[in-house]
Image (spheres, helix red, strand yellow):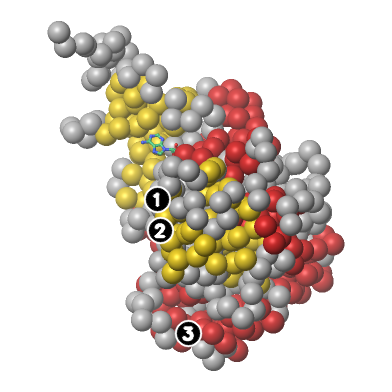
Amino acid sequence: MRRLPIHPRGADMHHPAIETDYLVVGAGAMAMAFVDTLIDASSDATVLMVDPHPLPGGHWNDAYPFVRLHQPSAWYGVASTRLDEAEPDPSGYGRGATGAEVLAYFERLMRERFLPTGRVRWFPGHQYRQGVDGSHRLVCLTTGVEQVVTVRRKRVNATHARTEVPSVRRPAYALATSVDCIAPGQLPQLQRSYAHYTVVGSGKTGMDTCLWLLDAGVPASRIRWIMPRDAWVQDRANLLTGEEHFVLSMRRTIDQFEAIAEATSLPDLWSRLEQRGVLMRLDPAVEPTSFRCAIASREEMTRLRRIHGVVRLGRLRSVERSHLVLEQGVIGAHADTLTIDCSAGGLQPAPGVPVFDGDRINLLMVSWCRPLFSAALIAQVESTVGDEAEQNALCEPVPVPERPSDWLLQWAVTLANAQRWRQSPPVEAWLKASRLNTVGVLLDGAGPVEPTHLDLLRASGAKAQAAMPNLNRLLASLSLHPPPAIREVSAGRLAHPDRVVP
Ligand SMILES: Cc1cc2nc3c(=O)[nH]c(=O)nc-3n(C[C@H](O)[C@H](O)[C@H](O)COP(=O)(O)OP(=O)(O)OC[C@H]3O[C@@H](n4cnc5c(N)ncnc54)[C@H](O)[C@@H]3O)c2cc1C
């Protein structure tokens, strides 16, 4: 006899259709930043948020316990509410809040700010699915019960990041059964030590894991680091906030525009940015082939350089008890080795769709390496700008960075967007008041902008403008078609990306 499912699939007769103005699919960091601004910018919009995770915060639900924000917390979070950490990073590396603090912050926002408005409904443990007839369906992952949602205004896709973290994904390489392999989150629970540790992956998770092992006292000689690609990394010192750091941060911003203006080629640009302390790399003898918005301190880089067992033989194909097979060679391995998989790709490529797309909004980055600021700005544009073409002109998607040249492409699109923000009164007014605006972040509530600060802001705007002709020339040297925004910006007046001089 065929067993029937306990709960029938399809629209459940006992659950009448739910109505909402905005259906926000995914409740990660970008969704939270979008809804936070939307409920302030619109006095009556209703929102339904859905996510399989039990708590809002997306990938932070699955993070390893020793993860912290790469940058100071003032750069992160939603517009209405600061994210504070209980105590500064004890390692002295200057990182921001812990993963647990980030998760608690989003949970508090949902409980104490969103839900009490009576305009936001939250469906944890549910997945969004579109029916073949185009209907919007929420599927309860525990019961299988489906509910139909009627969307009066728009569906907001907040899942484009497709953030991968090692705890929820199997390694993409083969593992012999006799090999011990864990996700970084399992490290603090280890019941015994190993003779050797192999960290697979050169992204930020790989860096965090190597640092965790070193900080735990594992000698650098017992760590092997599989590094398919070297990356350019931003120096955290340039992102420190508060009045005491403002001058350095602005000087570095000016330095980077000067480097763009003076560079004769892309390799020359990287070398100038490195000399001026904007970008860093692990090994000065190795040319990085990747840029992924990673941030580290000089102290962290110095500690990481103590690991000499860096393997640059391409991607890992398989791990055997006695050896590792990589794309470009085979190397021996100690039998008592723990493999730590850090190979999940945190960022996925942008999907090639516009932000405003009929009855859909795609939450994409519209500013340089700043996903949450971008999502909040998109909500402001949605609530205050009526025409879709105008909305999209204000929100040209910034490429999700992958290669070093994306560092420059991101700036080109960000500067073009910023120029248009300044010409849109509702967006400029929002930027002036928003704590997420760069100047607001850098000053971190330190009070009014002083004349010396204004001089630096003006200098930054002038340097950005002066950099544009060469920025376009450098981009044209790539065999890429520059996006339309790049052509437009060369004719326009530029300012610091989201600079608003009060
Ligand atoms: C280790 C790490 C450290 C980071 N540190 C920083 C930092 O210091 N500063 C910074 O600015 N950024 C940082 N980021 C990135 C940043 O946190 C943002 O989280 C990033 O933009 C991803 O957030 P998101 O909301 O876009 O996506 P996600 O967190 O991936 O959220 C998307 C959500 O959509 C849900 N979803 C998918 N499909 C469906 C469906 N069918 N129905 C319902 N829900 C669905 C998923 O379950 C998920 O919860 C970091 C990222 C990582 C991985």
User: Alpha-carbon neighbours of circle 2 within 10 Å: few (<14), some, or many (≥20)?
Assistant: some
* Element on which disc 2 rests: strand
Residue 174 vs residue 348, the one in the foreground: 174
Can residue 451 be seen?
A: yes
Residue pictured at 70% horizontal, 55% vertical: 211
Question: CB of residue at label 2: within 8 Å of ligand 1?
Answer: no
Q: Are marks 1 and 3 in contact (CB under 8 Å)?
A: no
Is 387 positioned to the left or the right of 61 in the image? Answer: left
Mark 1: amino acid: Ala
Residue topped by disc 1: 174
Q: Residue 318 occupies which quadrant of the picture?
A: bottom left
Measure the alpha-carbon separation of dots 1 and 3: 41 Å
Horizontally, is 87 left or right of 290 in the view?
right
Element assignment for label 3: helix
Label 3: how many residues lie within 10 Å, few (<14), some (14-19) or many (20+)?
many
In which quadrant of the rendered image does the N terminus lie? top left
Depth order, front residue of 106/70: 70
The answer to which of marks 3 and 2 sits earlier in the sequence is 2
Image point 16% across, 11% down: which residue? 2
Residue nearest the viewer, comparing 175 with 273: 175
Q: Is residue 417 above or below residue 351?
A: below
Toward the viewer: 455 or 239? Answer: 239
Amino acid carrying label 3: it is Leu
Please tell me which residue is depicted at 44% across the width and 25% down the height of the picture: 125
Rendered image: mark on residue 474: 3
Alpha-carbon neighbours of circle 1 within 10 Å: few (<14), some, or many (≥20)? few
Residue that mark 2 sits on:
317
Asked if residue 178 is positioned above or below residue 208 in the image, the reply reads: above
Query: Residue 490, how many percent across, how many down?
Result: 47, 80
